[in-house]
Amino acid sequence: MSQIIFNEISAAEISAMPTMQQLDLLAEFKVSPDDLENLDEHRFGKLERDGKTLYRYRANEMRIYFELEGESVIVHRVLHKNTFQDFLYRASLPISEDEELANAGGFWELIEEGERARRV
């Protein structure tokens, strides 16, 4: 992928992190077409809803939710892993995190908020 674009929300989320954590996260976040064709389940996830495909990248304690737009990676949210972990624990659902997120309306509201945000 040639360009990574953050919107206002994802840029603010990453800016709230300590500088060294930001640098580590950005150094680790590398996405190639091959990565997305052959998902490494330890690093990547794929969520689909209403014909829309969203990807999740795991980087230590953080989760980056993004989609592809041509040759660009559009980052919608950068969230700590515990954001949805409590929800999954309380729900005690025997399905994967990605499946649960794909079915959670609140998650898609977060993503849609990111989509509507200005890109920086």
Image (tube, grey):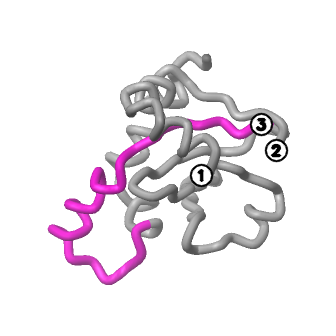
Out of 48 and 5, give the one closest to the viewer: 5
Q: CA distance from mark 3 to mark 1?
A: 13 Å
Quick one: SS at disc 2? Answer: loop
Query: Which of the 4 quarters of the picture holds residue 38?
Result: bottom right
Q: Amino acid at mark 2?
A: Met
Q: Amino acid at mark 3?
A: Ser
Q: Which residues are magenta?
A: 72-97
The residue under the point 62% across, 51% down is: 28
Q: Please give the residue where the numbered disc 3 appears in the rendered image.
A: 72
Q: Are marks 3 and 1 in contact (CB under 8 Å)?
A: no
Does residue 2 appear to the left or right of 92 in the view shown?
right
Which mark, residue 1?
2
Q: Are marks 3 and 2 in contact (CB under 8 Å)?
A: yes
Where residue 69 appears, as percent x and y from the top left, is: 76, 38
Q: CA distance from mark 1 to mark 2?
A: 15 Å
Label 3: how many Cα within 10 Å (few below 14, some 14–19, many 20+): few
The residue under the point 43% across, 45% down is: 108
The reply to whether the magenta stretch includes residue 99 is: no
Q: Which quadrant: the N terminus?
A: top right
Q: Please give the residue where the numbered disc 1 appears in the rendered image.
A: 54
